[in-house]
Amino acid sequence: MRAALATHVGAGYGDDMTNALPELRTLIARHARPDRYTTTVEGVRVIASAVTTQSMHHVTEPTLSVVAQGAKRAVLADKVFEYATGQYLVVSVDLPIAGHIARASAEEPFLGFAMTLKPAAIATLLLETETAASDRTLVETAGLGVSNAPTDLLDAVVRMLRLLDRPNDIAVLSPMIEREILWRLLAGEQGAMVRQIGLADSRLSQISRAIRWIRVHHAKAFKIEELADLAAMSASSFHRHFRAVTSMSPLQYQKQIRLQEARARLLAQSHDVAAVGYSVGYDSPSQFSREYSRLFGAPPARDVARLRTFSAEERSVA
């Protein structure tokens, strides 16, 4: 695979981050569970793993992920994004990503934080702070970005996780801390991409409408012109912006969504491979099996049998 390395594992982080990281690690280790990554704060997840994991495919919604210890790797089409201690990753649209924990051990387990990025919350913040700039253009880059986490962002994440020890404070304080986290993101290196999430008429939001349509109607055939109309763009502009965000064409994106949906259905105890292939939009069982094998590395039945031997940690990456 030709890979474009977005950042370097273990890239240095400033000394000013070190004050927040120890407490962040302690909080994640205290609240992470091997069978459950959600927390009592809506949209907030924590994960701890003493082992590296197999690469798993997921459709990842707009998310902030922060690594407190260890390293992860995410692959989007032919682009590789690696992020490690003191770094964060932003996903700005629903993307089919293959990811895994790349560095972890019993002595230094992987410790991570994730928070769903809500377009409405970002939009409200932009309007209230009068920073909804008139520029609605899309930066020509993938819908992922990796940066070193500044102290202010890490401090806010720590305060969000402290709420897990004070459940009575969650309802009142978590929305305020979420706003601060979003504000720190908007002020940071990935701010332009985060801003696009909240702007209803941004190019990113227009592409997101087409992406949501494909996800919901993944079994249906479509014409590029139809999706371009949905996104309020010309066909050529739509195709260019779609590829910039997802690193793939609309048809390639649909194929990934179909195959990931098929994999989930097969994993949910379905043994009729041909029927699952038909249900996600394939007319030919042989084509379904061939494309499934190309993406996941094994035919459907063998791949699902292998998946069922994985731990919960190996199945949960983002």
Image: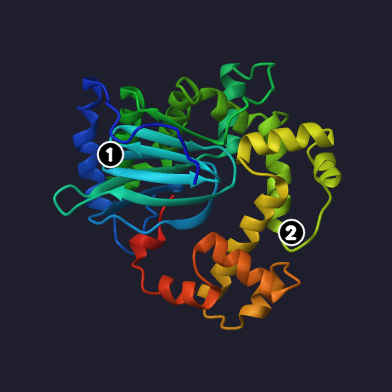
Which element type, helix, strand or loop, lies under badge 2?
A: loop
Q: Quadrant of residue 243?
A: top right
Residue 191 position, x and y percent, is: 51, 24
Which mark identifies residue 68? 1
- Disc 2 crowd rating (10 Å Cα; few below 14, some 14-19, many 20+) is some
Choose top left, top right, bottom left or bottom right for residue 9. Answer: top left
The numbered mark at residue 12 is none
Residue at the spot of label 2: 217
Residue type indicated by callout 2: His
Q: Residue at x 73, y 67 (%)?
A: 281
Q: Amino acid at mark 1?
A: Ala
Q: Which x, y percent locates residue 53?
A: 33, 57
| Residue at the extreme bottom of the image, as rendered | 271
The residue located at (25%, 57%) in the rendering is: 51
Towards the viewer: 244 or 150:
244
How far apart, in angstroms, are the residues tagged by discs 1 and 2?
37 Å
User: Left or right: 122 with respect to 184?
Assistant: right
- Percent across and percent down for residue 97 are 51, 49
Mark nearer the N terminus (1 vs 2): 1
Local packing at callout 1 (Cα closer than 10 Å; few below 14, some 14-19, many 20+) is: many
- Would you place residue 141 above or below residue 70 in this image? above
**Rendering coords of residue 8 (x, y %):** 35, 32
State which quadrant residue 132 falls in.
top right
Residue closest to the far left:
107
Visible residue check, residue 156 = yes
In percent of the image, x 66 and y 50: which residue is there? 253
The kind of secondary structure element at disc 1 is: strand
Residue 64 in view:
no
